[in-house]
């Protein structure tokens, strides 16, 4: 601990795991957990350490983090093409951001494991009928029937297999800078927002050429991250590394604790304290500076740069009021955390059609507030965490295509929260790049 005392951390199994599903069959759960415990890890300790080293650069203000992907991945219709389109979109965004900020961009997907969702309510009522809420494909089915909504431990094995498949696709494929640059130029040429982006694209073209000359390719590596919500699954895939003696979650490179499960006396914080992966915690508007400092003591007692990221999601209207004190006090403590903006989760509302949605302008406004706060304090605005897809969905409103409420029914595919579509995500990257540049 920072004051030199050693605190014994209780075993997470003895603590309350908020959001834990009510698995109906403990014997079946135990079988699946044993099967996973005997299966190969999905990522290696070396890859996790590489990501920690990359994030240490972010903590020092020498790099920027882009983290993005689905709110909830789906087990059905896993598609190589869809994974590649998501990868390409993240890499296109990284190229845009790296060129404007002149910093390397560390690219991390919400991918290959993002299958479990924390929910605000345990049940859902439709037309007078009440069933358990959907908790992500790792737990139950999205269909509104009793059978679908029953938690099924066998799904954990399917999540493992799907995550492995996704990682295989990601590892087998990267896009070269020229392809990415061309696609960015095509986007600008056909986008109604294109005119304003022209100058930036030319600058991006120039800095990409100089990057080519140096032989570097920012954003070419893609790491995998997800919310570490289901501790039975995470523990089953946690391994001791013989070489270093350290313990790593093997389900993904980086795991985060959600805003609903960051209780200091809860099982999630206790489990996360036992692993050596780079980790993050989501901080919503109720977070006090004292809570943030206590999380640092518990999760990063050695103050290792790159170990701990705070993903703040305060809302477009509140970020300027709530963030400064948090950043000031954490900064004054000397802890080397990475600060990232999630401009999505506190800007969600229900459209008249009852679809969950977000306004593109609110997303942009929260990022702007986040950047302003860091600029005023002289701290590094370390990155962006967004929900997006490479597909042409209509889930968030606004953007240069001016999607409105009337468009939501057209192509709303998210199983949980609304994502930026590919064009909205690129537009966001260009607009954030202009703020950074
Ligand atoms: C999420 O990232 O999908 C999520 C549920 O976020 P939060 O924990 O910030 O609410
Ligand atoms: Mn979400």
Image (cartoon, rainbow, N blue to C red):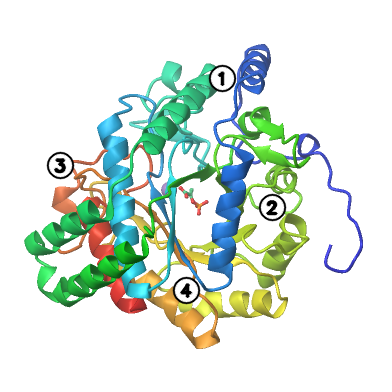
The quadrant where residue 230 appears: top right
Q: Quick check: 352 above or below 154?
A: below
Mark 4 secondary-structure assignment? helix
- Residue at the (92%, 62%) spot, across then down: 5
Expressed as whole percent of the image width and height from the top left, the position of residue 123 reads 49, 34
The numbered mark, 4 or 2, whose residue comes first in the sequence reads 2
- Residue at the (88%, 69%) spot, across then down: 3
Expressed as whole percent of the image width and height from the top left, the position of residue 102 reads 38, 73
Q: Residues within 10 Å of mark 3 (few under 14, many from 20)?
A: few
Residue corresponding to mark 1: 153
Mark 1 secondary-structure assignment? loop
Residue corresponding to mark 2: 263
The numbered mark, 1 or 4, whose residue comes first in the sequence reads 1
The numbered mark, 3 or 1, whose residue comes first in the sequence reads 1
Residue corresponding to mark 3: 410
The quadrant where residue 200 appears: bottom left
Alpha carbons under labels 4 and 2: distance apart: 22 Å
- Which mark is nearer the camera, 1 or 2? 1
Expressed as whole percent of the image width and height from the top left, the position of residue 251 reads 57, 35
């Amino acid at each position: 601990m920072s004051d030199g005392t050693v605190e014994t951390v209780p075993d997470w199994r003895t603590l309350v795991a908020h959001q834990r599903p009510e698995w109906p069959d403990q014997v079946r759960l135990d079988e699946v957990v044993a099967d996973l415990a005997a299966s190969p890890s999905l990522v290696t300790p070396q890859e996790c350490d590489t990501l920690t080293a990359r994030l240490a650069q972010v903590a020092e203000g020498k790099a920027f983090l882009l983290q993005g992907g689905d709110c909830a991945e789906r087990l059905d219709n896993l598609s190589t093409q869809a994974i590649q389109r998501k990868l390409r979109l993240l890499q296109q965004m990284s190229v845009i951001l790296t060129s404007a900020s002149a910093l390397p961009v560390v690219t991390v997907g919400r991918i290959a494991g993002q299958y479990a969702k924390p929910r605000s309510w345990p049940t859902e009522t439709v037309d007078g009928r009440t069933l358990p809420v959907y908790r992500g494909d790792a737990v139950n089915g999205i269909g509104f029937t009793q059978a679908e909504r029953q938690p099924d431990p066998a799904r954990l094995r399917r999540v493992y297999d799907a995550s492995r498949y996704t990682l295989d696709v990601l590892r087998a494929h990267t896009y070269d800078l020229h392809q990415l640059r061309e696609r960015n130029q095509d986007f600008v040429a056909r986008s109604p927002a294109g005119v304003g982006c022209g100058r930036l694209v030319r600058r991006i073209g120039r800095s990409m050429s100089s990057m080519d000359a140096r032989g570097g390719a920012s954003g070419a590596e893609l790491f995998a991250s997800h919310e570490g919500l289901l501790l039975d699954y995470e523990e089953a895939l946690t391994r001791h590394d013989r070489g270093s003696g350290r313990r790593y979650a093997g389900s993904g490179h980086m795991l985060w604790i959600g805003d609903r499960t960051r209780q200091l006396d809860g099982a999630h914080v206790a489990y996360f304290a036992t692993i050596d992966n780079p980790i993050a915690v989501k901080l919503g508007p109720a977070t006090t500076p004292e809570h943030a400092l206590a999380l640092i003591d518990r999760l990063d007692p050695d103050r290792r740069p790159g170990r701990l990221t705070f993903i703040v999601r305060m809302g477009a209207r509140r970020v300027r009021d709530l963030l400064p004190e948090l950043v000031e006090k954490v900064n004054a403590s000397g802890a080397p955390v990475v600060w990232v903006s999630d401009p999505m989760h506190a800007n969600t509302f229900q459209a008249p059609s009852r679809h969950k949605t977000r306004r593109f302008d609110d997303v942009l406004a929260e990022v702007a507030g986040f950047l302003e706060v860091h600029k005023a304090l002289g701290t590094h605005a370390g990155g962006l965490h967004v929900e997006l897809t490479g597909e042409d969905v209509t889930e968030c409103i606004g953007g240069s295509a001016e999607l409105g409420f009337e468009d939501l029914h057209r192509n709303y595919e998210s199983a949980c929260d609304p994502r930026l579509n590919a064009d909205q995500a690129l537009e966001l990257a260009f607009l954030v790049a202009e703020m950074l540049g």
